[in-house]
Image (cartoon, coloured by chain):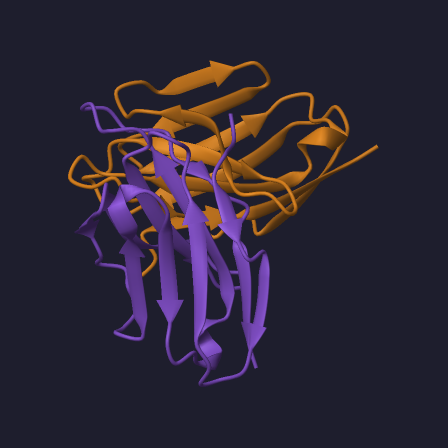
Amino acid sequence: QQQVKQSPQSLIVQKGGISIINCAYENTAFDYFPWYQQFPGKGPALLIAIRPDVSEKKEGRFTISFNKSAKQFSLHIMDSQPGDSATYFCAATSPFSDKLTFGTGTRLTIIP
Amino acid sequence: EAGVTQFPSHSVIEKGQTVTLRCDPISGHDNLYWYRRVMGKEIKFLLHFVKESKQDESGMPNNRFLAERTGGTYSTLKVQPAELEDSGVYFCASSQAASGVPNEQFFGPGTRLTVL
């Protein structure tokens, strides 16, 4: 059973557009929701993270929106650039464990 | 400062053979994690070391997998004997000691294992 569901599997966005990736979770014990960015040949790297006590967190062009009642969270990339082309993973952890529970990943391609 | 390193970057073996993957965490990081991504699927947790002790090994698929962390430094993950379904990318991550808040996990580049 997949505890964190991520969509879409792949996404193509024009340069300057908004990229949106969605995730939904089942486990209400999750209390920390990071997003990881992975470039080819590299490991995932933390991009931005949110706790459920806030509904939105913004860092530069990257924003996480969080809906606790719907158990959903999403990543918005504003003014998307070709350098943002990568695979993005949402994840979640609970207070009882350090382990990350990941979504299946979204391959984002930004076209000029 | 060097990041998390993994060796080898690629390994191709035949079913039934043994493979050992190595991970060197960031110096000073007590926490070391192993994850695996089978093609197209999610990255799945395998286990978590705190120093040399196994804190959580709930994700280990079966007893063909053996993880060790000698002296709380580098870690090895041995698969013996390897099966076709073990193919995937194995990631290692490390983080500093827990302090009551989630620790950022720093990932290595992964080892791509192909079992033929």
Name the quarter where the C terminus of chain A is drawn.
top right
Q: Is residue B55 left or right of residue A74?
A: left
From the top left corner, tell me how far across and down residue A101 is, in percent: 34, 47
Name the quarter where the N terminus of chain A is drawn.
bottom left
Image quadrant in which you'd find residue A55: top left
Above or below: residue B114 compared with residue A5: below
Q: Which chain is purple?
A: B
From the top left corner, tell me how far across and down residue A15 is, in percent: 77, 28
Q: Which residue shows up at 18% across the image and 24% down it? A: B100
Residue furthest to the bottom: B16
From the top left corner, tell me how far across and down residue A107 is, in percent: 62, 47
Image quadrant in which you'd find residue B42: bottom left
Q: Which residue shows up at 24% across the image and 32% down it? A: A31
Residue A103, can we see it?
A: no
Q: Which color was chain A given?
A: orange
Q: Is residue B50 left or right of residue A83?
A: left
Is residue A7 or residue A107 the one in the foreground? A107
Q: Which residue shows up at 53% across the image and 57% down it? A: B111
